[in-house]
Image (cartoon, rainbow, N blue to C red):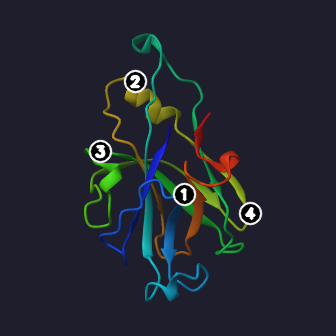
Amino acid sequence: NIMTATAEENAPDTKTFNNGYAYVGLDDGEKSGNHTDIINGLQKTRTYAEFDFKIENEKDATITEAKFNMYKYTTFGEDEKREVGLYSVDETMNISDLTWNNQPENKTFYTAETIDGSIGYVSWDIKELVNDWINGKVNNGIVLQYINETQQAEVFATKNNEHETRRPNIS
């Protein structure tokens, strides 16, 4: 059960908890069509996710493979290559009330994946992060954020997306 919320710079008090889609990157409103509702689009966007990661006999466990997967279903940036960083959130947050104005400030970079104009699942290797959780790091969730936040945003499906086969998962 992966819960998500997007922090949107140009809608700084908007709560997007599990709304079916999640933005990452810069949305100027042109390609997304958001400029009709919000002047200049959403601007910078970051997606936060929380999920329980329970492992039997956790103290003796070492995870050798773990992936966080989200389905990208837009091609706003066409073939422009963009790096989507995955960070651990290093302070408590209430994801159901998350907004741009109250998003956590403390995070640690773990990995990045490059996206382009293709549609489909993007997978981040979270093996190191999960092992850190097993070894005592508090699981406050993750944030997906472009390494260069001035690049064109894309949209990912969340747990309430109408297409069940496109929802985020851990593998």
Q: Quadrant of residue 76?
A: bottom right
Percent from the top left, x then y, of residue 75? Answer: 69, 71
Q: Which comes before the other along the chain, label 4 or label 3?
A: 3
Give the amino acid type for the residue marked by disc 3 in the picture.
Answer: Asp
Cβ atoms under marks 2 and 3 closer than 8 Å? no
Q: Residue furthest front?
A: 162
Helix, strand or loop for disc 2? helix
- Height in image: 129 above or below 45? above
Helix, strand or loop for disc 3? loop
Give the amino acid type for the residue marked by disc 1 in the picture.
Answer: Gly
Query: How many neighbours does mark 4 have within 10 angstroms: few (below 14), some (14-19), or many (20 or more)?
Result: some
Q: Which comes before the other along the chain, label 2 or label 1?
A: 1
Q: Which residue is mark 4?
A: 118
Give the amino acid type for the residue marked by disc 2 in the picture.
Answer: Ile
Q: Residue at x 32, y 31 (%)?
A: 137
Q: Which residue is mark 3?
A: 90
Observer-side mark, 2 or 1, equals 1
- Height in image: 33 above or below 19? below
Residue 135, numbered circle: none
Q: Which residue is mark 2?
A: 134
- Height in image: 171 above or below 95? above
Cβ atoms under marks 4 and 3 closer than 8 Å? no
- Height in image: 136 above or below 26? above
Q: Residue at x 47, y 84 (%)?
A: 37
Left or right side of 2 for 161: right
Give the amino acid type for the residue marked by disc 4 in the picture.
Answer: Ser
Q: Which residue is mark 1?
A: 20
Percent from the top left, x then y, of residue 166? Answer: 67, 50
Q: Which comes before the other along the chain, label 2 or label 3?
A: 3
Cβ atoms under marks 1 and 3 closer than 8 Å? no
Alpha carbons under labels 4 and 3: distance apart? 31 Å
61 or 57: nearer the viewer: 57
